[in-house]
Image (cartoon, rainbow, N blue to C red):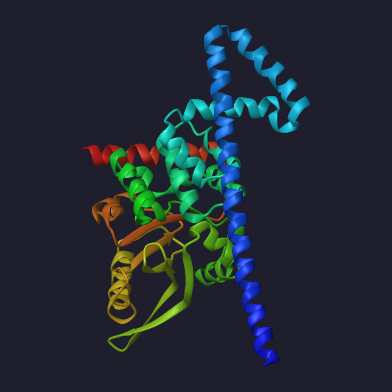
Amino acid sequence: MKNLEIQNTDNLLLSIVDLIDNARNRVSLTINSELTLLYWNIGKQINEDILKNSRADYGKNIVAELSNELIERYGSGFNKRNLQSFIKFYAVYQDVEILHTVCAKLAWSHIRQLIYIEDGLKREFYIQMCIHEHWSVRTLQGRIESMLFERTAISKKPEQTIINDLKILENEKQISPDLTFRDPYFLDFLGLHDTYSEKDLESAILFNLQNFITEMGTEFAFLARQKRIIIDNEDYKIDLLFFHRGLNRLIAIDLKLDKFRAAYKGQMELYLRWLEHNEMKEWENKPIGLILCSEKSPEQINYLQLDNDENIKVSEYLTKLPEKKILEEKLQKAIALARQTVNN
């Protein structure tokens, strides 16, 4: 009887703890949303006042004076830099309906990073990915600095395709392969030197699996290394096998030390068909293959029409990062070329 009483008390305690935690989470979200709306309104007031007076020197002076007065009353949260962020926030989000949606889903610390992305489509990409994958502020900063948008397949698609995919992600919580896969992948954390084998590369990835999954995307789940399959009494091995929860698909990864070769496509097709018939569950979507090469072969990829292939992706990986300026130029050139090809 006594044990039953203890069990009942424990159950009651857990129920109450759950109620308190849920209430606190709701309060925290409400406070965050209200504070963010406050910052927007402050930005609106300052902006309208500056426009009303229509003097550039007045704008600079009023922000500095306001900051000093507000710091004295409310603390350092209203310093000059933050006031300028409030003004920028209002300038970026003048649609009140969109504003309320963003405020309800993201903290001010996230929004402050996002408002300085001038390209609206790129900003929306980071907003939806941040919400979908529950990025911390630090993760968001890292994704922006590593030019994630420019590295995803979606950046090379027509603008309307990007808009459509982001809307599906926002409204239906369904992520597309083009939002998932990247090119290139940054594997600088592996610590590989000038010469290494495929086995070294694979071992380094598994040793740094958490970093590898962070680079790949948060919804990747590791399943197997050197997945053995038998076809016509011959042994084949899939280097790495993952499952992507958002795509609801098995992901086969083939690691190559050299540049892409046309034969790699046939090899991957064989793996995918085997997985489809022997490993895929009835509720899953068809598997996708990712061929990771040290270098892409644009002409071969173009002739094989792999840029438009739904099931096989080809990406480069970098074990050493180039200068950001060089990388940025390379990515922007790739995006422009891909979009030009689509338009033609």
For residue 136, say whether it is visible.
Answer: no
Pick the front one: 147 or 284? 284
Nearer to us in this view, 95 or 287: 95
Where is 249 relative to 301, above or below? below
For residue 1, side relative to residue 165 (left or right): right
Residue at the spot x=36%, y=67% of the render? 248
- Residue at 50% across, 49% down: 130
Give residue 237's quadrant in the image.
Answer: bottom left
**Residue furthest bottom as drawn:** 1
Q: Residue at x 58, y 19 (%)?
A: 46
Task: Identify which residue, 81 or 138, lies in the foreground.
Answer: 81
Q: Position of residue 6 (x, y in %)?
A: 69, 84
Residue 174 image point, x, y percent: 36, 57
x, y percent for residue 36: 57, 37
Is 75 rendered above or below residue 310?
above
Q: Quadrant of the C terminus?
A: top left
- For the question of whether residue 285 can be seen, the reply is yes
Q: Residue furthest left?
A: 344
Q: Which residue is painted at 63% across and 73% down in the image?
A: 14
Task: Name which quarter of the figure residue 76 lies in.
Answer: top right
Counting from the top left corner in percent of width and height, residue 30 is at 57, 46
Q: Is residue 40 above or below residue 306?
A: above
Give the left or right position of residue 94, taking residue 337 as reference.
right
Q: Is residue 225 above or below residue 316?
A: below
Tell me the quadrant of the picture where the N terminus can be found: bottom right
Foreground residue, 16 or 296? 16
